[in-house]
């Protein structure tokens, strides 16, 4: 979250307050008194001076910056009872800067222990205001996809509103419904993708963060899977996931993709057959990938399999196997056949789902999501036996050794979490006993 740039202050009093807030205090008591005085004046100019829009916005931007940088200011603003007035301003916000500032102040107030968000929902129409703002953006997509260079931009205003929705729903799950906001958000996902907006990736993540915690029970199937194009929404989500796995660093993907993966799982449970088949085709490994052990190609399914064992993505390590299991018709045999026992074993053990490797390999059942049930496929790696190199013909590269060590580490950690056995992770044991060899970065594979 970035601070909002403050323009040339119209009021000398606001400038003086900012200097006081930044100056080191002579004493703790004086600091508290000065801060409270400054906050009161900022609230006076920001909330009670609506006839002067420039001064009001400058005062609110100063206040938002102070709240962002100083948690104690959030508590003070809440204690002064400003939340209700800000909620009323947000309800009547007619410009981008008003939406941005009001939503950000309310979002920061949600971090305050003394702010009663239930009261804002019950008596100050906060839920309806958030839904109205999202609906307006869904009707007027053009300002979101153009980049006028203004700060804040319409996309920034919508982002603050979406983050506010997420915070309110998390704090008041039984009190805040937001079911009427689902369809406008779904429309935004497809509209932003169609326009190839620069801001669409960031907005897509915020929309997914909000959607994955909202109930879909009241959402019509036609909103999720339009009758004229049932696959439209899932095509967008799969494309966004594919782009993120190519362009983002592994450390970022937990934050970027977790909500999208959860939402796909929730959609799949009520998806029509055409959508299920589309997801199976796009996300499960294909036959041509079995010339190598699964996970070694550059397809989307291979990238997801690698993420399912990556130490950088603890959330996706749980979500991706769950998604593949769902795509396999929740059949352990089909799941192992689709991704190989090496990738499936941790999930099956953690869920205590029984499975016999040899039985699954020889099965003739045509289960949902199955891509190959033939006996010439290695059940552990998913590779065709005919494509496996003869034993001992090629040593492993350093990259392959590192990948296998990482997979081994994750598997042992999962085994420990089951509580079935108390086993020492061999990778951790090697680290503890100093048996790891430091390899120079410029060492070649054949060294």
Image: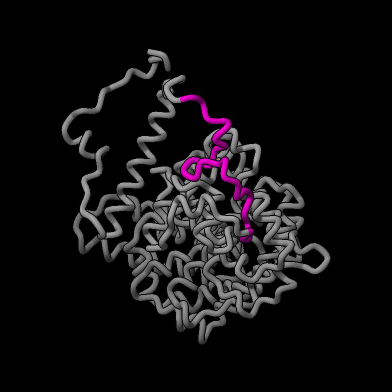
Q: Give the residue drawn at x 71%, y 61%.
A: 275
**Left or right: 425, with 303 as reference point:** left
| Residue 281 in the figure: left or right of residue 64 | right
* Relative to 26, 267 lies left or right: right
Residue at position x 50%, y 61% from top?
59
* Residue segment shown in magenta: 366-390
- The residue at the point 57 percent across, 57 percent down is 260
Instruction: Name the image quarter holding residue 165.
Output: bottom right
Image: 400 above or below 196: above
Q: Residue furthest right?
A: 228
Asked if the magenta segment contains residue 386, the reply would be yes
Q: Nearer the viewer, residue 349 or 414?
A: 349
Which corner quadrant of the image does residue 74 belong to? bottom left
What residue sits 41% from the left and 34% below the top? 403
In the rendered view, tell whether residue 41 sits above or below residue 259.
below
Residue 323 position within the rendered picture, expressed as x and y whole percent measured from the top left: 54, 58
Quarter placement of the C terminus: top left
Image coords of residue 79 (percent x, y) = 35, 75
**Residue 43 coordinates in the image, percent (x, y):** 46, 69
């Amino acid at each position: 979250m970035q601070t909002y740039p403050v323009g040339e202050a119209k009021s000398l009093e606001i400038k003086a307050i900012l200097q006081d807030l930044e100056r080191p205090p002579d004493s703790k008591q004086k600091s508290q008194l000065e801060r409270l005085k400054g906050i009161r004046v900022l609230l006076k100019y920001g909330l009670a001076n609506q006839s002067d829009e420039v001064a009001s916005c400058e005062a609110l931007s100063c206040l938002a910056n102070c709240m962002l940088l100083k948690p104690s200011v959030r508590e003070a603003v809440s204690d002064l009872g400003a939340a209700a007035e800000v909620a009323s301003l947000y309800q009547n916000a007619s410009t981008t800067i008003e939406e941005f500032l009001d939503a950000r102040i309310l979002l920061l107030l949600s971090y305050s222990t003394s702010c009663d968000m239930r009261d804002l929902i019950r008596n100050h129409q906060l839920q309806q205001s958030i839904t109205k703002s999202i609906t307006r953006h869904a009707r007027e997509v053009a300002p979101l996809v153009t980049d006028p260079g203004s700060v804040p931009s319409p996309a920034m205003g919508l982002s603050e509103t979406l983050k506010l929705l997420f915070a309110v729903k998390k704090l008041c799950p039984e009190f805040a419904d937001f079911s009427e906001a689902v369809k406008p958000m779904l429309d935004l996902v497809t509209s932003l993708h169609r326009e190839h907006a620069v801001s669409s990736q960031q907005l897509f993540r915020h929309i997914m963060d909000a959607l994955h915690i909202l109930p879909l029970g009241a959402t019509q199937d036609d909103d999720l899977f339009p009758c004229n194009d049932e696959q439209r929404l899932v095509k967008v989500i799969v494309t966004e996931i594919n782009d993120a796995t190519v362009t983002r660093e592994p450390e970022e993907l937990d934050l970027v993709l977790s909500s999208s993966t959860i939402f796909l799982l929730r959609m799949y449970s009520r998806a029509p057959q055409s959508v299920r088949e589309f997801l199976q085709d796009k996300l499960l490994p294909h036959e041509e990938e079995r010339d190598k052990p699964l996970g070694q190609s550059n397809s989307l399914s291979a990238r997801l399999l690698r993420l399912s064992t990556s130490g950088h993505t603890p959330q996706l390590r749980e979500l991706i196997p769950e998604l593949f299991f769902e795509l396999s018709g929740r059949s352990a045999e089909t799941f192992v056949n689709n991704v190989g026992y090496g990738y499936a074993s941790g999930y099956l053990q953690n869920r205590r789902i029984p499975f016999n490797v040899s039985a699954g390999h020889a099965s003739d059942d045509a289960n949902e999501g199955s891509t190959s049930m033939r006996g010439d496929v290695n059940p552990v790696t998913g590779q065709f036996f005919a494509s496996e190199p003869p034993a001992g013909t090629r040593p492993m590269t350093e990259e392959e050794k590192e990948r296998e060590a990482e997979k081994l580490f994750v598997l042992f950690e999962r085994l420990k979490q089951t509580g079935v056995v108390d086993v020492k992770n061999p990778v951790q044991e090697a680290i503890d006993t100093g048996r790891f060899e430091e390899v120079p970065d410029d060492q070649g594979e054949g060294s």
